[in-house]
Image (cartoon, rainbow, N blue to C red):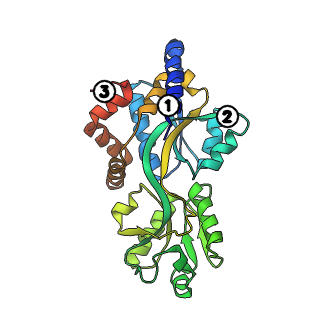
Amino acid sequence: MLGKTSKIVLSAVLGLGMVTGAQAQSNEPVRIGWTAWSDAEFVTKLAKDVIENRLDRDVELVQTDIAPQYQGVANGDIDVMMMSWQPGTHADYLDKVNSDGVKAINLGLLYGYARLGWAVPNYIPKSELNSIEDLKKDSVREKLDGTITGIDPGAGLTRLSKKTIEDYGLDDYNLQTSSGAGMTAALDRAVKRDNWIVVTAWSPHWLFGAYDMRYLKDPKGTLGSYERIHAFANVGFYQRDPEVAMFLSRMQIPLDDLEAAMYDAQQTSYEKAVQKYIDNNKARIDYWVTGDVK
C-alpha cells in the first residue's frame, strides 16, 4: 500500500501531467502487460474495457511471463503491468529494473490480502498432510509421486517454491513447472480421481471456489505472508497518458468481488464476466474514470 507521502507525491506528479500534458495526450495504444493467471486476466481485461469504452483509447495487451513484464515496463516496450505482487514476491524483479535509477513506478493498489501457498484437496486427511513439514514422510511422498505441481517457471511463486523445497529439505521432490492453466488442469484430473496432489497456488483464484481446498501450513514462512497487488508503469507513462494513469491510480477491487468475478469467468468467459462486473458496479467504475465521489 502506498504511504501517505508517496500518495501525495504521486498525486502531485499525476496532477502536473494532467495540466501540462492534457493537450499532448498520446495517440499510441496503451500497452498493458499480463500473464495468463486468472486474476491477472480478469483485472487486465477489465482495465482494457474501461480504457477503450470510457476513455476512448486503444489498448494493446501484451502477454508474457512476469519477469519480462518488469523489463518491458522499464525499457518502455510495455506501458503498464497490472500484477505486481508487493512487498515480497516480486521485490527482486522491481529492485533489478530500478537498480540504476527509477524506471518503473507504482500507480497504486489494485487489491490486498493476496497470498501464496501450497494447497491440497480437502479429501487428503489432515492427519497425514497438513503442513509442508509432513511432506517429509515417506508415505506422503509416495502418494504424491515426489511431485509438487507448479506454474510458469518465471513466476515469483515458482522462485519461492524452489526456496521452500530447499529450506524444508525436500530433496526427493520435483517441482513440476508448466503454467497456471497446466496446474489447474492437473488439479482437476487429480480431484476427479481422488488422487493426492499438492499445487502451488495463490489467492485470489477461482480454484478455491471450484474445489474444496486448503493451504498447507508453512511454519518456516518461506512462501511469505499477505501481499498487495499493484499496477506499475513506465516512469514516463503518466506524462504521455495522464488520463489513463489517473484512472489506473484509482482502480481498486474488493477481494471478494474479484474472486466472484473470476469464478464467473470460468463459468462463462472473461469478456462476459468483465461486462457483468461493469454493469453491476457503475458507481465504482465512474469513480475510477472521473475521480468524482457520489
Kindly identify the residue that appears in the image at 50 percent across and 41 percent down. Answer: 230
Tag 3 and tag 1, C-beta contact below 8 Å: no
Residue 245 in view in this figure = yes
Percent position (x, y) of residue 237?
57, 27
Q: Residue 184's quadrant in the figure?
A: bottom left
In the picture of the structure, the residue carrying the numbered disc 2 is: 75
Residue 241 in view in this figure = no
Instruction: Classify mark 3: residues with Cα within 10 Å, few (<14), some (14-19) or many (20+).
Output: few
How far, Cα to Cα, is label 3 from label 1? 18 Å
Q: Which of the labelled discs sits on residue 293, or is there none?
A: 3
Say which amino acid is labelled 2. Answer: Asn
How far, Cα to Cα, is label 3 from label 2? 35 Å
Secondary element at tag 3: loop
Instruction: Classify mark 1: residues with Cα within 10 Å, few (<14), some (14-19) or many (20+).
Output: some
How far, Cα to Cα, is label 2 from label 1? 24 Å
In the picture of the structure, the residue carrying the numbered disc 1 is: 7
Label 2 or label 1, whichever lies nearer to me, is 1
Secondary element at tag 1: helix
Kindly identify the residue that appears in the image at 56 percent across and 48 percent down. Answer: 87
